Every structure is written in structure tokens, then in C-alpha cells.
């Protein structure tokens, strides 16, 4: 029998995944001497920390109570993108007539096969996060619950490990919002959604954040009748409103039914699940077959005995300073357990800071990180730096440049011209302080702007960089041209005119 709900159904692909990330026959090693670093949690932050430290010659122990790879591999980034790619394929076929390609029999989605593909690819990726790989790297891998004894000792499955420094990278898990009736029904979270093998005919989703939007659009494209409920106005409440409105129209076109500004939300188990809510003055009482809850997360700290070692934490996570150090200077934290940026790539770079600071008395700061993110809907929405309203709150005046994809040749030819690139620069300069991209591959495009911000390259430098034609990245270069045109003031233009007249 499979150990974990995340690894259902019990097929060859999940068996291979389990063999890699929590082998049933694994024997915990016998500790020999003090570890330079004990890492608790084998998600992205823990894996990067352990591998990096071991690669530098440190003696490292890695403890995991569940599945190595954490959320990203098992119930997050990897499976969700597998589902999204299958849903995009269905949408592409459904809209193929726009390109002169006819599908006479219509689009029939085999959901079971799509999910099997996801499990197969997840298993294929899993060796990179496997217990065997990390043992081969020289890391002592322990499976079991970890509990701090004191500031230099941690216990796992009855074995005490002595350490010089420790890193807490235990991540976070979905939280259950206080919705009347929710505890009376079986509902899905990201930890159980990817175990589905049959397409729900009617899927209710609570929460129109990134996960809610990605899955709402995907399941609607598969053929589910999707009801998306959000307490705030519209979708992606924290996102650029112009960007969110474009995506909202696309999701509605895909068949998602959005009930935003939801009030008096309740769940009833009445011959099946029923969801009741008020939206914009109208009361709804909707029957659904499956319910996905994607609202909020809580840190995994309860069993660590943090009080015994003076590590402070609150409802959103462990308290750390900008060097990723907890209130106990011998113990660090990284990833979702302590960060407001709950992204795999953020956890990766926080782990790099922890390695330098914990092993070599470094002074690297997490506040120096410029972290982009992306919601992988169609179109995608990617962002880095400040939003315009955040700049105003900080008292920073900005100039904003916008390039729509309606005027980008490649986007027009691809049929992907709904969206824009929006860049905020410090007023009167080309110094980039923030950007939002709405495009089919916004997650790829945002990296050029992130690179520029990280290394102090202005919008003018981007404009002077040759981009291959035709590409959608040309939209970013066009913004550089927009900035350059602002340098041509009437006075400068008059000087040019006089010079050209004189040299004629």
C-alpha cells in the first residue's frame, strides 16, 4: 500500500517516484561525529542547501519526514505544469480552426491519460531529488520526524544528531479557511488534486489566486463545469489590475464561471456537495462533484520543538533576519517556512544565502534578491519588482511605459496578441523598478527584465540590444525605444534640425 495520499493511484509511475523520494527499504545511517550542517526538510530549500554544502566539503545530514522534493516535485510546480500543458494542448486543438486546421469530430479529452502522462513525467524528473542521489553526493539522508533537543542536537527516529549549524526548511501546507460546513465534506487541496484519475463533471474552486486560476482554466479546458469563488473583486487580487482583467476575460471564454466579491460562503453536504454564496447581490446554490480549496498556507513547525531552542515563529512562519538567521543564531531557515515569497526559485536562492552565511560567516542578505514570479495561465502573467501602487506607497515617483502585443509582429502571427509589457522606471531615468508581462510565455520573457534590474541595466540599454526578429521579446526592446524617444526633447530636436540643415 502506498504510504502517502499524494502518491495515488498506485501505478508504476508513482511506485517509481516513491522508490526515488522515499524508498520503503531505506536504512537511516549511523551518525559519526558532529555535522557542519543539519538540514530539516528536503524540499527545494533543503535540497539546495544540502547539495551545495556537501559540494563545498561540509559534513551534512538531511532529514525528511515525507517525500523528498517537497511540494514542488510532488504536489506543486511539476504536476501542475504537467496538467496545464495537457489543458493547453486541448485548447489549441479546440481553436485550431482559426489557423485553417479542422478537427471534424471535435475535441475529446482523455483525462485519465493526461494525468497518467503527468505522473510519468513527474517520475522521470524525480531522480534529481532522490535519496540515492543525495547519498551519492555525500549527504547522510534520514527519514523520520525531527525534533530539536537543544541548540546543537536534533533527534530523528530515536537517533541524536549533533550539529554546528542547522537549517529549517520544512515548508508549508494548505490551510483550511473557516468556511461553515467545510469540515463536513471531503475537499481537495494541491496535496490531493493531482491524484485524480476521473474528470469531475462539476468542480468548485475556492480562491482565485495563482493556483485557483491555473486549475480553474485547466479543468474548464478539459471539460469540467468550473465554479470559481473569490471573496475580493475579480481574480488575482494582488496582481496588476490591467493584467488580471485580460486573464479574467480569457478564463470566462474558456467556460469558467466566476463568482467574485463572494459573501456568506458555506458548504453543505446534502446528497452531495453544495456550495452557497452571494456574489454581487445574487444568491447562488450550486451542486458540485469535487471541491478544491486554494486559500492560504501555514508553516510546518508544530513538531520541531522550536521553543526548546529559542526559535521564534508566528502564524505565517519562522522569524528570520535578512541573513536568513532565526532568533537562535545557530539555526537558519529558508523557503516557504519563513518567506513571504513562496516560490521554488525563491527558496533556491535563499538556500544559497544560507550556505554562505552559515558555513563561512557570510553577510549575504535576502533583501538583495530580486525575485520574479509567474502565474501559468493562458496568457501567463509574470511580474518582478514593484507595482505602481507600491512605488507610490514608498514615495517613489515613476514613469510607466507600456507596449501591447497588438503591435508586435510575432505575437500577431502566433495569434497571441492579447497582452502587454508594462515597465516602471524611476521618474526621469531609465532605472527599472518593476515590470509586469501578460503573454503566452510571460514567464520566459520576464527574465530579461529581471537580469537588467539585478545588474543595473536601464531600459535604454535594452533598447540598444539587438533582438532576433520576429520574436515576442521584441516587445521589451520596443519599450527601450519608447524611453529613447523621450530623450528627444523639442530643444534637442531643434539642434538636430539646425545641424542637418547646415550640413546639407
Image (cartoon, rainbow, N blue to C red):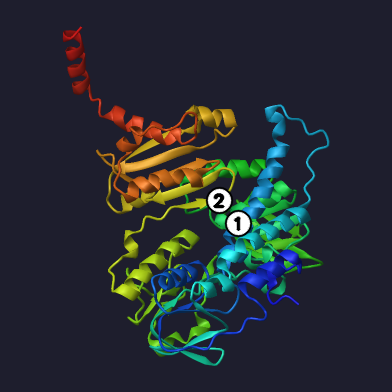
**Image quadrant containing the N terminus:** bottom right
Query: Which tag is nearer the camera, tag 1 or tag 2?
Result: 1
Label 2, residues with CA under 10 Å away: few <14, some 14-19, many ≥20: many
Q: Nearer the viewer, residue 25 or 411?
A: 25
Q: Nearer the viewer, residue 257 or 399?
A: 399
Task: Where is residue 116? Give x, y as percent.
Answer: 74, 58
Task: Where is residue 74? Give x, y as percent.
Answer: 62, 66
Quarter of the image for residue 459 reads top left
Q: Circle 1 sits in a helix, a strand or a loop, which is it?
A: helix
The residue at which mark 1 appears reads as 212
Task: Where is residue 133? Give x, y as percent.
Answer: 55, 70
Residue 242 makes an appearance in the image: no
Q: Vertically, is 139 above or below 259? A: below
Q: Nearer the viewer, residue 190 or 125?
A: 125
Task: Where is residue 260? Give x, y as percent.
Answer: 59, 52
The residue at which mark 2 appears reads as 235
Q: Are marks 1 and 2 in contact (CB under 8 Å)?
A: yes
In the picture, measured across the screen, residue 2 lies left or right of residue 503, that is right
Q: Residue at x 66, y 40 (%)?
A: 253
Q: Nearer the viewer, residue 351 or 198?
A: 351
Distance in Å between CA atoms under marks 1 and 2: 9 Å
**Image quadrant containing the C terminus:** top left
In the picture, measured across the screen, residue 458 lies left or right of residue 469, that is left
Residue 303 makes an appearance in the image: yes
Amino acid at each position: 500500500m502506498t504510504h502517502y495520499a499524494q502518491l495515488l493511484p498506485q501505478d508504476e509511475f508513482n511506485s517509481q517516484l516513491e522508490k526515488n523520494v522515499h524508498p520503503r527499504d531505506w536504512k537511516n545511517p549511523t551518525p559519526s561525529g558532529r555535522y557542519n550542517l543539519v538540514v530539516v526538510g528536503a524540499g527545494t530549500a533543503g535540497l539546495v542547501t544540502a547539495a551545495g554544502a556537501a559540494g563545498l566539503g561540509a559534513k551534512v545530514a538531511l532529514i525528511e519526514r515525507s517525500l523528498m522534493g517537497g511540494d514542488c516535485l510532488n504536489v506543486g510546480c511539476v504536476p501542475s505544469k504537467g496538467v496545464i500543458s495537457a489543458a493547453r494542448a486541448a485548447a489549441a486543438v479546440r481553436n485550431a480552426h482559426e489557423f485553417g486546421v479542422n478537427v471534424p469530430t471535435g475535441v475529446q479529452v482523455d483525462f485519465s491519460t493526461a494525468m497518467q502522462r503527468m505522473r510519468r513525467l513527474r517520475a522521470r524528473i524525480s531522480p534529481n531529488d532522490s535519496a540515492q542521489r543525495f547519498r551519492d553526493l555525500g549527504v547522510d539522508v534520514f527519514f523520520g520526524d525531527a525534533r530539536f533537543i537543544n541548540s546543537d542536537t536534533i533527534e530523528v527516529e530515536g537517533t541524536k544528531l549533533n550539529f554546528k549549524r542547522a537549517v529549517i526548511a520544512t515548508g508549508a501546507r494548505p490551510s483550511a479557511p473557516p468556511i461553515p460546513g467545510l469540515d463536513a465534506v471531503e475537499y481537495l487541496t494541491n496535496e490531493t488534486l493531482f491524484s485524480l484519475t476521473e474528470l469531475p463533471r462539476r468542480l468548485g474552486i475556492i480562491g482565485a489566486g495563482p493556483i485557483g486560476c491555473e486549475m480553474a482554466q485547466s479543468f474548464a479546458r478539459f471539460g469540467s463545469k468550473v465554479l470559481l469563488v473569490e471573496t475580493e473583486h475579480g481574480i488575482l487580487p494582488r496582481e496588476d489590475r490591467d493584467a488580471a482583467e485580460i486573464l479574467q476575460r480569457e478564463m470566462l471564454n474558456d467556460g469558467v464561471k466566476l463568482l467574485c466579491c463572494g459573501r456568506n460562503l458555506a458548504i453543505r453536504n446534502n446528497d452531495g456537495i453544495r456550495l452557497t454564496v452571494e456574489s454581487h447581490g445574487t444568491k447562488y446554490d450550486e451542486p458540485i462533484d469535487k471541491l478544491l480549496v486554494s486559500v492560504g498556507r501555514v508553516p510546518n513547525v508544530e513538531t520541531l520543538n522550536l521553543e526548546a531552542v529559542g526559535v521564534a515563529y508566528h502564524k505565517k512562519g519562522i522569524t528570520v533576519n535578512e541573513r536568513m538567521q532565526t532568533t537562535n543564531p545557530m539555526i537558519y531557515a529558508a523557503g516557504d517556512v519563513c518567506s513571504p515569497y513562496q516560490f521554488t526559485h525563491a527558496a533556491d536562492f535563499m538556500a544559497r544565502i544560507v550556505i554562505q552565511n552559515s558555513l563561512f560567516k557570510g553577510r549575504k542578505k535576502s533583501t538583495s534578491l530580486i525575485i520574479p514570479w509567474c502565474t501559468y495561465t493562458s496568457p501567463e502573467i509574470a511580474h518582478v519588482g514593484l507595482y505602481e501602487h507600491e512605488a507610490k506607497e514608498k514615495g517613489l515617483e515613476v514613469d510607466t511605459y507600456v507596449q501591447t502585443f497588438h503591435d508586435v509582429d510575432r505575437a500577431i502571427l502566433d495569434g497571441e496578441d492579447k497582452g502587454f509589457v508594462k515597465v516602471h522606471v524611476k521618474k526621469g531615468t531609465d532605472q527599472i523598478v518593476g515590470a509586469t508581462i501578460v503573454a503566452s510565455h510571460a514567464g520566459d520573457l520576464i527574465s530579461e527584465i529581471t537580469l537588467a534590474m539585478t545588474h543595473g541595466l536601464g531600459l535604454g540599454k535594452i533598447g540598444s540590444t539587438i533582438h532576433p526578429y520576429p520574436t515576442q521579446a521584441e516587445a521589451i526592446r520596443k519599450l527601450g525605444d519608447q524611453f529613447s524617444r523621450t530623450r528627444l526633447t523639442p530643444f534637442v530636436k531643434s539642434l538636430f534640425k539646425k545641424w542637418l540643415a547646415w550640413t546639407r
